[in-house]
Image: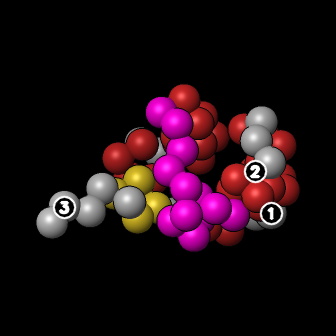
Amino acid sequence: MKNLIKVERARHNLTQADLAKKVDVSRQTIYAIENNKFNPSVTLAIKMARLFEVTVEYLFDIEED
């Protein structure tokens, strides 16, 4: 699943640690999501989308085969 977390984080001038604190996860979790090593829970995806004021669908793109 592709995502735009890193792009949105940069637009909002947030570090991985800043974002992690705002959505109540570890910095390592943000790193793993950004590098497509981990898919977030629905709750976490919604928290991030709300924080960035975008839709979940914009933030996360499911790659279809």
Quarter that holds the N terminus: bottom left
Marks 1 and 3, Cα distance to the nearest angstrom?
30 Å
> Which stretch appears magenta?
31-42
Earlier sequence position, callout 1 versus callout 3: 1
Position in image of residue 2 (x %, y %): 40, 64
Which residue was labeled with disc 3?
64
Magenta stretch encompasses residue 38:
yes
Asked which secondary structure carries label 1, the reply is loop
In this view, the residue farthest toward the top is 43
Quarter that holds the C terminus: bottom left
Q: Please say if 43 is above or below 63.
A: above
Q: Are marks 1 and 2 in contact (CB under 8 Å)?
A: yes
Position in image of residue 18 (x %, y %): 83, 53
Q: Amino acid at mark 1?
A: Thr
Q: How is the image coloured?
A: secondary structure
Asked whether residue 8 appears in the rendered view, the answer is: no
Q: Please say if 47 is above or below 11.
A: above
Earlier sequence position, callout 2 versus callout 3: 2
Local crowd at mark 3 within 10 Å, few (<14), some, or many (≥20)?
Answer: few
At 48% from the left and 33% from the top, the residue drawn is 42
Magenta stretch encompasses residue 13:
no
Which residue was labeled with disc 2?
19
Asked which secondary structure carries label 3, the reply is loop
Q: Nearer the viewer, mark 1 or mark 3?
A: 3
Marks 1 and 2, Cα distance to the nearest angstrom?
6 Å
At 55% from the left and 64% from the top, the residue drawn is 37
Q: Amino acid at mark 2?
A: Leu
Q: Amino acid at mark 3?
A: Glu
**Hey, which quadrant is residue 64 in on the image?**
bottom left
Asked whether residue 47 appears in the rendered view, the answer is: yes
